[in-house]
Image: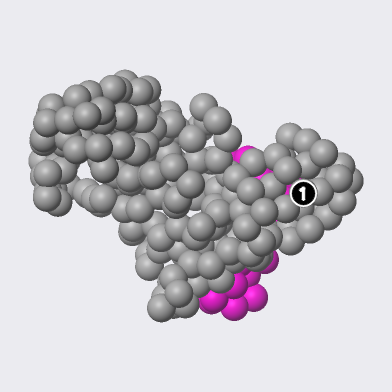
Amino acid sequence: ILNVEQSPQSLHVQEGDSTNFTCSFPSSNFYALHWYRWETAKSPEALFVMTLNGDEKKKGRISATLNTKEGYSYLYIKGSQPEDSATYLCACYILTGGGNKLTFGTGTQLKVEL
Amino acid sequence: NAGVTQTPKFQVLKTGQSMTLQCAQDMNHEYMSWYRQDPGMGLRLIHYSVGAGITDQGEVPNGYNVSRSTTEDFPLRLLSAAPSQTSVYFCASSEGRGDTQYFGPGTRLTVL
């Protein structure tokens, strides 16, 4: 079973703070790394898909970086707002002989307080 | 486009009953997957399909069957429900291998 680990498990920040989370994954046979935003009572929604070492993606105040050689990705949120409160999931796609499957981490739960 | 749809939204079963969770997508995606979400466990892959007529097992396939007779539909069958199958089930589709997953709204299943 592939290990995709996220830290921290949860995070409380104040409005306006910048924050970042980590996703670590096996670096061998890497194919793609996904980030999803998951609000309570809704479905996960894609933020980024990254495939190349050194990739950086940005959407508004949220950005992500990827290091496939050492097996980690960072998600950054600049100037957090209450509407950023959600669980942020990363998922890794590894090419294996037993099939090509997306494996999710357990997520980082972010709470932004006024 | 409706995207990915799932029915029912909620279901309560008794131990030993069988049922089918429906999933459909209208984006002409080849890849479809079923996940279950349990507290502290994240999303775990049950079964997936890379095209009509082709399915494979994920991380937690026991107790579930799937088939893919059309590109649009990917039903998940619970053969004999057990309390351990109480969970929220998400269906997802993607255009190709490693591509963005589009999730359905989920089905909350309780097995008594």
* Residue B72 belongs to magenta span: yes
Residue, x 36% and y 30% (percent of image)?
Answer: A109
- Where's residue B93, x and y in %? 46, 63
By secondary structure, the bulk of the magenta-drawn segment is best described as loop
Q: Position of residue A36 (x, y in %)?
A: 33, 46
Inspect this view and state whether residue A92 appears: no
Q: Where on the picture, by quarter, is residue B67?
A: bottom right
- Please name the residue shown 79% across and 58% down the image: B19
Query: Magenta residues?
Result: B59-74
Q: Position of residue B60 (x, y in %)?
A: 63, 40
State left or right for residue B58 relative to residue B20: left
Q: Nearer the viewer, residue B108 or B102?
A: B108
Q: Is residue A106 magenta?
A: no
Does dot 1 land on a helix, a strand or a loop? strand
Q: Which residue is mark 1?
A: B12
> Callout 1: few (<14), some (14-19), or many (20+) C-alpha neighbours within 10 Å?
few
Where, quadrant-wise, is the C terminus of chain A in this rendering? top left
Residue B100 point in image, percent of width and height: 34, 58
Q: Nearer the viewer, residue B16 or A29?
A: B16
